[in-house]
Structure formats: C-alpha cells, structure tokens
Image: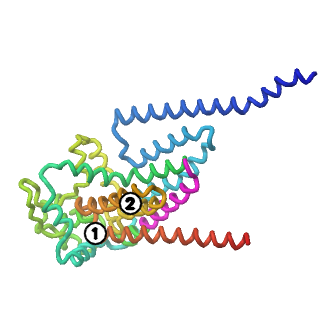
C-alpha cells in the first residue's frame, strides 16, 4: 500500500473524535431541549415546583442532560446525594424531640425578644401596624422571600456544579454542614415559633409538649393573645390576632395552588424547629459565600436579601428575633470553621511541598 493510499485512513482516524464530540453535543442539546419542554409543560399544567423534592428532581435531571459529553452522568447522583439526604432528614426530624425526650421551649424566645425590645414583642408590633385585611402587593415580596429558602440554595449549587466544581464543593460543604447542625439542634432543643405561641396559653404547654392540640386551632380563640401577648390592630378590618402569613402574598397573584402546597408542606414538617432559624442562617451563609465571588454592585442585593428574610420571618410569625440571631450566629460559625480548615490544609500542603 502506498503513502497516498494511507492518507485517507489517517484522516478518517483523526476525524473520529471530532465526529463523536459533535454527536454528543447534538445529543446534549436534544436532551436539554426535552428537559425544558417537560419541565415547562409540568409548570404550565401543575404550577411552579414549590415542593423541594420535586425541585431537586428537576435540577438533577437537568444536570444529567447538561452533562452529556462533559462529565459522567453518575457524578450527578454521587454529588447531589448529600442534598437529598438533608431533605430526607429534615422531613424525618418531626417527632425527634419526643423520641429523645426533650421538652419544647415555649417561653424562652418570647421572653428574650421582650427583653431585647423593652417589653415589646416584635411580631405583635409589626402585625398590629402592617397587617391588612387583604394581602397588599408587598406581601408578594414577603412570600417570595420566604419561599426562596427552598429554591435559591439548589439553584446556586446547580450553577456552580456546571461552572466550577471546586466552588461547588465548597458551597455543598457549607450547605450540608449548616443544615445538619441545625437539624441536630432541633432535636436537642425543640422550640415553638411565634405563630404557635399565639395559639397556646401557658397552661396548655406547662409540660413542654412538642405538638399540643392548641397548635392546630386559630389564635382567635385564645384569650389575651396566648403566650405571645394581646394584639390591637391599627388597620381597619384586619384580624386582631397573630396569624401565620408567610404564604398569604401568593393570593395577590392568584397562586392559590402554590399557597395550598406550601401550607401543606409546612404542616408536615417539624413544627418546633425554631432554634436556630435555618431560613435566616442559610440566607446569611449564602451572602457570605457569594460576597467575594460577585461584583461590588451585587453586594447591596445580598445585604437586602438577608435583611428582607429577617423581616419576613418576624412579620409573618415564623420566627422570633432571637431565632434569627442564633441562625446568623450558626452561619458565621460554620463559615468561619470551614475557612479555618481550608487555611490549615493549605498551609500544611505548602509545608509538605517545601
């Protein structure tokens, strides 16, 4: 065989990897397009995914599609399993305090908030002055901010997983350690939120129960505002009792299905997981993580997100200010600890190289 005859064979061999790469790119585009159509159809017919497990499924299947030709699909399962475990453990944590035998705190945060604000209960003060008979437009912001806790961390993780694996690993460590630490605290120190304290009297919870029947009635029936204290609204027509209104803003957009799903989800999880506030802690942890990774113009947005989340939690009776401060403390502690471990490992590696 002559050299001239060999040239087409060599060219064909060289073109093989290019042809395979093109096929993988085409397959990836088809997979991503199919994923967009399926998810779009689901959203159009059943609504936005407010369920965290369904949202995680959407993200993971989207990452599988986007990974074709880039990295092994099994990496999605391996890398995202910790996120799934957090959701499973969070849902299973209901009743953990009873199982361990720890009494639920009903008075401590309320007393702490009154001490910090000179006898004023922040949740009562805010709902007296701001709560209206029907949700105003800005309660859409309240409900969106509250719901972002169930979406934003997973979206950030998904983007990092595709763009920078090392940064994704750091974020995953922060999310998992912060979440599991909070879950352990929930089991060891169960604590009731403001909306529950408004529905119960001191006599109802004298033994520190985790799920007394008073939690499932309206605060309207409770004399003197229960443990939280009496409320006198300044808004004509507004209810003069404390309400759990973190999902009320969806009514403005006529997303009643979304509100019903969130209400159902709230009723099925641990109801005495107030200390620390993971909503507050995770929002601050995200802000700290992104602070040096985004442009300066985005930093005010991060600050606004943290403060809006704090306002949302207190106004909607989801958490006391005490819970929020403890959540922030936990976020700072975990962030600092992880940074310290990385600095120690980096110095050790430099010494080994030297």
Q: Residue at x 19, y 73 (%)?
A: 202
Quadrant in which residue 88 is drawn: bottom left
Main secondary structure of the magenta stretch? helix
What residue is pinned by disc 1? 321
Residue at image point 9% right, 57% down? 235
Which one is nearer the viewer's eye here, 15 or 256? 15
Q: With respect to residue 76, does 173 lie above or below? A: below
Residue 296 coordinates in the image, percent (x, y): 42, 58
Q: Earlier in the sequence, mark 2 or mark 1?
A: 2
Image position, residue 344 (x, y; %): 60, 73
User: Which residue, given by chain and number where applicable, does mark 2 sit on?
Assistant: 283
* Residue at x-position 25% and y-position 63%: 314
Which residues, given as a range, are shown in magenta? 163-183
264 or 81: which is nearer to us? 81
Tell me residue 217's x, y (percent).
19, 58
Residue 219: quadrant of the picture? bottom left
Q: Is residue 85 magenta?
A: no
């Amino acid at each position: 065989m002559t050299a001239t005859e060999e040239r087409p064979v060599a060219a064909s061999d060289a073109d093989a990897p290019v042809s395979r790469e093109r096929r993988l790119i085409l397959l990836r585009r088809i997979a991503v397009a199919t994923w967009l159509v399926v998810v779009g159809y689901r959203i159009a017919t059943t609504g936005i995914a407010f369920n965290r497990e369904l949202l995680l499924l959407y993200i993971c299947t989207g990452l599988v599609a986007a990974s074709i030709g880039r990295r092994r699909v099994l990496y999605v399962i391996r890398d995202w399993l910790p996120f799934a475990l957090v959701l499973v453990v969070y849902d299973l944590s209901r009743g953990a305090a009873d199982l361990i035998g720890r009494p639920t705190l009903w008075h401590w945060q309320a007393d702490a908030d009154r001490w910090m604000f000179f006898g004023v209960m922040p949740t009562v003060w805010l709902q007296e002055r701001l709560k209206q008979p029907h949700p105003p437009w800005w309660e859409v912001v309240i409900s969106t901010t509250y719901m972002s806790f169930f979406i934003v961390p997973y979206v950030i993780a998904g983007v990092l997983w595709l763009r920078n694996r090392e940064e994704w690993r750091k974020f995953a460590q922060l999310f998992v350690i912060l979440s599991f630490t909070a879950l352990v605290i929930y089991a060891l120190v169960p604590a009731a939120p403001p909306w529950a304290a408004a529905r119960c009297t001191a006599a109802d919870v004298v033994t520190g129960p985790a799920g007394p029947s008073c939690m499932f009635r309206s605060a309207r029936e409770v004399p003197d505002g229960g443990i939280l204290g009496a409320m006198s609204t300044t808004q004509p027509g507004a209810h003069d009792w404390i309400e759990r209104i973190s999902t009320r803003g969806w009514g403005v957009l006529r997303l009643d299905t979304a509100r019903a799903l969130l209400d159902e989800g709230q009723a099925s999880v641990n109801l005495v997981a107030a200390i620390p506030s993971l909503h507050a802690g995770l929002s601050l942890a995200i802000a700290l993580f992104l602070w040096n990774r985004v442009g300066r113009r985005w930093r005010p947005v991060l600050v606004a997100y943290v403060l809006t989340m704090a306002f949302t939690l207190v106004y909607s009776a989801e958490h006391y200010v005490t819970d929020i401060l403890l959540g922030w403390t936990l976020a700072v502690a975990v962030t600092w600890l992880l940074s310290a471990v990385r600095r120690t490992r980096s110095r050790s590696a430099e010494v080994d190289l030297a």
